[in-house]
Image: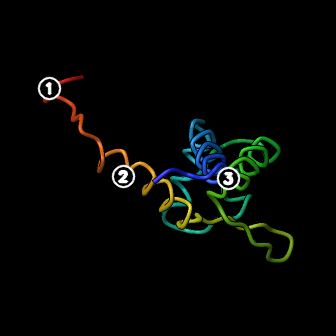
Amino acid sequence: MLATTQESIQIWSAFRALSDPLRLQILELLRSQELCVCELCEQLDVSQSKLSFHLKNLKEANLVNSRQQGRWIYYSLNLAQFVILEQYLAEYRRYSDILPARGCQ
């Protein structure tokens, strides 16, 4: 199944967002629970401005959801987007005639 232009842009955006080590750390922390910006700053030992930049990228890639409660913004994973990426990658595995040889590095 060929992705539409809009779907291709969404997939590209998500993979681009996943290419940064700090963003991967953020996602790992959000894997088990919703966290506020202050908790993420503390656990990652980064400034709020730096973290905000990376959270903005993750949010634009639709990988995280945010909600405001009082003065804090809480972030959680958008699992639906991860399902889309998983399905996209599975298409390559499912329909590929070429399988990697055993022992190839």
Quarter placement of the C terminus: top left
Q: Amino acid at mark 3?
A: Gln
The image quadrant of residue 19 is top right
**Contact flag, marks 2 and 3 (Cβ < 8 Å):** no
Report, in whole angstroms, how far the alpha carbon at label 2 lies from the one at label 3.
19 Å
Tags 1 and 2 in contact by the CB under 8 Å rule? no
Mark in the foreground, 1 or 2: 2
Residue type, numbered disc 1: Gly
Q: Is residue 89 left or right of residue 46?
A: left
Where residue 90 is drawn, which disc sits there? 2
Please give the name of the residue rendered at 67% of the width and 59% of the height, measured from the top-left corner. 39
Residue 103: give its label. Answer: 1
In the picture as drawn, the residue positioned furthest to the bottom comes out as 69
Write down the residue under mark 3.
6
Quadrant assignment, res 68: bottom right
- Seen in the picture, residue 59 relative to 17 is either above or below; the reply is below
| 2 or 3: tag closer to the N-terminus | 3
Q: How many marks?
A: 3
Q: Secondary structure at mark 2?
A: helix
Spot occupied by residue 28 in the image (x, y as percentages of width and height): 51, 53
- The x, y position of residue 2, in whole percent, is 50, 50
**Other-residue count near label 1 (Cα within 10 Å), few / some / many at <14 / 14–19 / ≥20:** few
Q: Nearer the viewer, residue 92 or 41?
A: 92
Q: Is residue 97 left or right of residue 60?
A: left
Is residue 52 left or right of 78 when viewed as pictured? right
Q: Earlier in the sequence, mark 3 or mark 1?
A: 3
Of labels 2 and 3, the one closer to you: 3
